[in-house]
Image: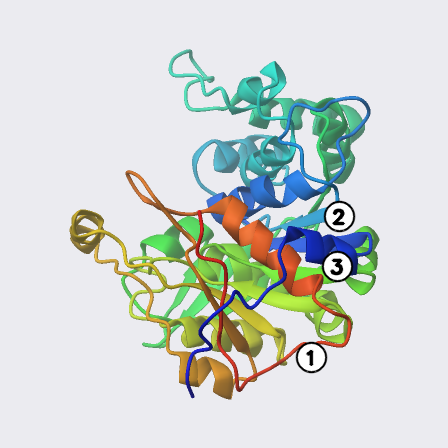
Amino acid sequence: MSIQQGPAAFPDSDQARAHSRPLRVVAIGGGTGLSILLKGLKRYAPAPGTVTSAPAIEPVIDKLSAVVTVSDDGGSSGRLRKEFNMLPPGDIRNCIVALSEDEALLSRLFQHRFNKGSGLEGHSFGNLFLAALTSITSDFAEAVRLSAEILFTRGHIFPATTSNVELEALMEDGSRVRGETKITASKGRIKELVLVPPDVEPLSQTLEAIASAHLITIGPGSLFTSLIPNLLVRGIPQAIIESPATKVFVCNLMTQANESLGLTAADHIHALNRHAGGRIFDYALINRTPVSPALKAKYALEGASQIIADLDRIEALGVCPVLGNYLDEASSARHATDRVARDLIALVTQSPDAPKVAPALRFPVNTHS
């Protein structure tokens, strides 16, 4: 199968608007990856009230929702979880800030981390703020909603579940590892992931958002500790599979030592499908730009490398690879959030007659920065 050459496979911005309708978008994940993606997507969502400091792009997203894993047990989040018997706020906080108006003082305030002070050192103000609101409302989801209002976010943020859950990994050698921090640090290969307790429920708003979505994304993010945990919450994988939305996997740029070492792009998709109990994705956004030799050497010291895009295996899974320049390289490899968001919007604003899955084609998308 040959890669399609010539003009960009997706319509330009004017064409996209001509084919667009108000979109409902659901982004699922956790960690740094989800917050980076949300920064790009929010530029296509209308600003709340009269706040207009974000870059001006004609809004095409009517409703933007983030579904965020809540299994973190390390750092500031882990300490608050143990001391206040609350859900970990860290990933939620990052998403709230990502969807807020970046230049606003409150955004910087939420990310401020105390570097001294008995009991305060290591905590971020945003985590403490969410802890205080949770104590006042006795409802973590309501605390998240109120925090999002205060920061004028351009979207809704839902914890994957409001139950107090832990991750447990069954390793290939038959051993079991309990807790996200220990799983991440484990040297063994993960065979399967489960939640403890197993039968936890999602928020009804999450299922409603998934059912009515035009676009659902999963990734980027740590495969076993940011992405798969969302699919272990009862009802979420079934809702995704049954949703008529266009479903896209945003592939990671690099492997993660001790978690996804040696796993290809197709391996990631297969693991997500297996834990979901069915085929999820129509498309996979995959970076085609090599990292620099210097960054490659830096990641090699950590036992990590650029993820292999095994396109034939991806297509065999019924997924259409979309190749693009999604690398934003600085001191580390990060997704170019504007380009990823642009191509996600383009995927769902194609002609309504375009097929969702085109396994015979590999689309190279716009290459301009």
Across and down, in percent, residue 189 comes to: 33, 70
Q: Could you say whether the residue bearing mark 3 is in a helix, strand or loop?
A: loop
What residue did someone put label 1 on?
355
Q: Residue at x 53, y 71 (%)?
A: 272
The type of residue carrying mark 3 is Glu
Q: CA distance from mark 2 to mark 3?
A: 31 Å
Q: Neighbour class for label 3 at 10 Å: few (<14), some, many (≥20)?
A: some
Q: Residue at x 82, y 52 (%)?
A: 22
What residue did someone put label 3 on?
201
Q: CA distance from mark 2 to mark 1?
A: 21 Å
Q: Neighbour class for label 1 at 10 Å: few (<14), some, many (≥20)?
A: few
Q: Quadrant of residue 280?
A: bottom right
Across and down, in percent, residue 31 comes to: 50, 46
**38 shown above or below 240:** above
Q: Could you say whether the residue bearing mark 2 is in a helix, strand or loop?
A: loop
Residue 60 tag number: 2
